């Protein structure tokens, strides 16, 4: 069966510090991978998606970047965090190009930038 | 562009029925999803509609009208544990046959005794 791992669960970082959140998927090949952010009391905002190794699409201009060094690994990064980067970050995957397939979410990372 | 609207908050009584509406405007529509999200947790899948009509799954049902850009989630026999946010999400197809899922802001449902 497929599983998705995301870490860390919580993170407190000072403004201006770097960020690296990692997500890995097991039990499937060539998944579509996604990073979402959810601000407190708000909906999910799609940040990045990837349909293959090294292929990253950004949805909104921001202080963050994403990379996919391996088929089932997706990394969210920042060189210098801003206060506005605080939020709940969710990694998700879906089977590639399959109709009716839902997103499967990781457990999330609660990031607080102080 | 894409736009998804749903009410911000709703309240209901335990044992009652509640309907959460969602309207959307999108290009390349390729399905509508409903997710449930408890505070501080990841969303969990509830239902999927790609054709017009009603899909029933236990206490939860979801309806879709593609011509109207409209969906609703119906929750029956409400329980206290149903207090959560309910997210409407639209999947859009884009070049290359790939899809992405765009979420609405969610509806916070409070169930009280």
Image: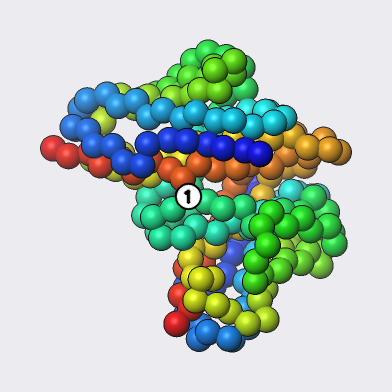
- The extreme front residue here reads B1
Residue A70, percent from left and from top: 81, 64
Asked whether A101 or A87 is in front, the reply is: A87
Asked whether A73 or A55 is in front, the reply is: A55
Q: Is residue B22 above or below residue A9?
A: above
Q: Quadrant of residue A24?
A: bottom right
Is residue A22 among what the camera can see?
no
The residue tagged with tag 1: helix, strand or loop? Answer: loop
Residue at horizontal 68 percent and vertical 62 percent from the top: A61
Q: Is residue A97 above or below residue A70?
A: above
Residue A45, percent from left and from top: 56, 53
- The extreme left residue here reads B113
Q: For the C terminus of chain A, which image quadrant?
A: bottom left
Asked whether B72 or B16 is in front, the reply is: B72
Residue A57, percent from left and from top: 77, 55
Q: Is residue B56 left or right of residue A48?
A: left
Residue at the spot of label 1: A43
Q: Is residue B78 left or right of residue B56?
A: left
At label 1, counting other C-alpha atoms closer than 10 Å, the crowd grade (few under 14, some 14-19, many 20 or more) is many
Residue at horizontal 49 percent and vertical 57 percent from the top: A38
Residue at horizontal 22 percent and vertical 25 percent from the top: B16
Residue A6, percent from left and from top: 59, 64
Q: Chain of mark 1?
A: A
Q: Quadrant of residue B56?
A: top left
Q: How is the image coloured?
A: rainbow
- Count of picture labels: 1
Is residue A62 among what the camera can see?
yes
Q: Is residue B5 above or below residue B77?
A: below
Residue at horizontal 59 percent and vertical 47 percent from the top: A104
Asked whether B9 or A3 is in front, the reply is: B9
């Amino acid at each position: 069966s497929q599983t998705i791992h995301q870490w860390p669960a919580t993170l407190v970082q000072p403004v201006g510090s770097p960020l690296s959140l990692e997500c890995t998927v097991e039990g499937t090949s060539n998944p579509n991978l996604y990073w979402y952010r959810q601000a407190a009391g708000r909906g999910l905002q799609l940040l990045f998606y990837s349909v293959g190794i090294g292929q990253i699409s950004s949805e909104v201009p921001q202080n963050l970047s994403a990379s996919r060094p391996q088929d089932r690994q997706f990394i969210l990064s920042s060189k210098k965090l801003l206060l506005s980067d605080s939020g709940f970050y969710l990694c998700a995957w879906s089977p590639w190009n399959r109709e009716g397939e839902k997103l499967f979410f990781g457990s999330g990372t609660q990031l607080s930038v102080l | 562009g894409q736009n998804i609207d749903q009410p911000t908050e709703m309240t209901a009584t335990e044992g009652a029925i509640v309907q959460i509406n969602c309207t959307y405007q999108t290009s390349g529509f390729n399905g509508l999803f409903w997710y449930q999200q408890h505070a501080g947790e990841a969303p969990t899948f509830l239902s999927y509609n790609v054709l017009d009509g009603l899909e029933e799954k236990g206490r939860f049902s979801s309806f879709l009208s593609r011509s109207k850009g409209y969906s609703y989630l119906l929750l029956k026999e409400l329980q206290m544990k149903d207090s959560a946010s309910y997210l409407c999400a639209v999947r859009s197809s884009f070049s290359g046959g790939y899809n992405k899922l765009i979420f609405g802001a969610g509806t916070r449902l409070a169930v009280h005794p």
